[in-house]
Image: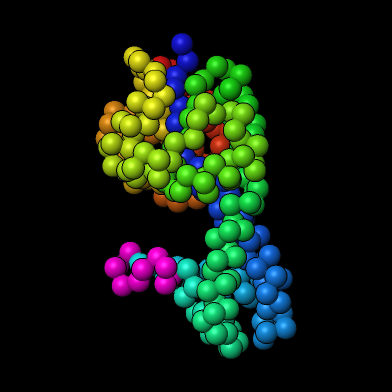
Amino acid sequence: MNALLFFDLDHTLWDFETNSRLALTQGYDAFDLGAKGIPRVEDWIEAYEEANDLCWAEYRAGRMTKDVLRGQRFLMASEKLGAAMNEDLAQRLGQHYILTSPHQTGLIQGTHALLSELQKRGHDMWLLTNGFEEVQHLKVDRCGLSTYFHGVLTSDALGVKKPHPDAFLKALESTGVVNPGQIYMIGDSWESDIEGAQNVGWRGVHFNPSGSVEPGAWKTVRRLEEVLALPLIP
Ligand SMILES: [Mg+2]
């Protein structure tokens, strides 16, 4: 028997940052922002990312709803660049971004090589991701990742998000595997993926390309291919 493996999707396999920039560029072109006082798409992306961080901080502090956040970050980005944009355009850019992002197919370097080798070794692999059912499935299908996984388990379908223990327990139940032995969770988020998984007795493989190493993680890898050298025994 080979070990049961769970993978996170965003920032672990699906290159969120690259895909976000691709979606922003498409929105920039679709709404002709070059003719609306924002001559360089690089500036637009930079201003958006800064505004997005600020909006998420407001959201986490309970001072902004997600609905407002979706358009507000575009409004703030345009203000930062001194370009006039009305709320209607910001809303439409927000909508465009939400719809376009999941279609992008940028993957973290080494994704296919890692997954195909683990599949060859006979691991039973599942995706366990916080996100909406349609969105996460679309990303997986568009990137050609479905072939590696027995299933895609979203917080949307499970009704609970990582790092809540029930997210991991329900995910395990969904696999139908009895007596799984040692289970592994590979992900980029210390709190959601690693701490959450280790709290239910799984082993966490922290994919942490550049941050400081969390001593509590079972293993830390800087590149995906390093996972292949780990003793993933059941
Ligand atoms: Mg992630």
Res. 63 in view: yes
In the rendered structure, the answer to whether residue 119 lies left or right of residue 37 reads: left
- Residue 162 appearing in the image: no
Rendered view: 198 above or below 208: above
Task: Residue at 63%, 75% (x, y): give it.
Answer: 43
Residue 151 magenta-highlighted:
no
Question: Outermost residue, top direction?
Answer: 1
Quadrant occupied by the C terminus: top left
Q: Specify start and end residues of the magenta stretch as a single range.
A: 60-69
Residue depicted at 40% across the width and 65% down the height: 66
Q: Nearer the viewer, residue 207 or 29?
A: 29
Question: Taking 205 as reference, is 36 above or below it?
Answer: below
The answer to which quarter of the image holds residue 62 is bottom left
Position of residue 91 in the picture relative to residue 179 (left or right): right
223 is higher (above) or lower (below) than 227: below
Q: Is residue 64 magenta?
A: yes
Q: How many marks?
A: 0
Q: Position of residue 18 (x, y in %)?
A: 62, 56
Q: Residue at x 40, y 45 (%)?
A: 156
Give 56 or 108, whichever is nearer the viewer.
56
User: x and y percent of residue 64 in the render?
Assistant: 35, 71
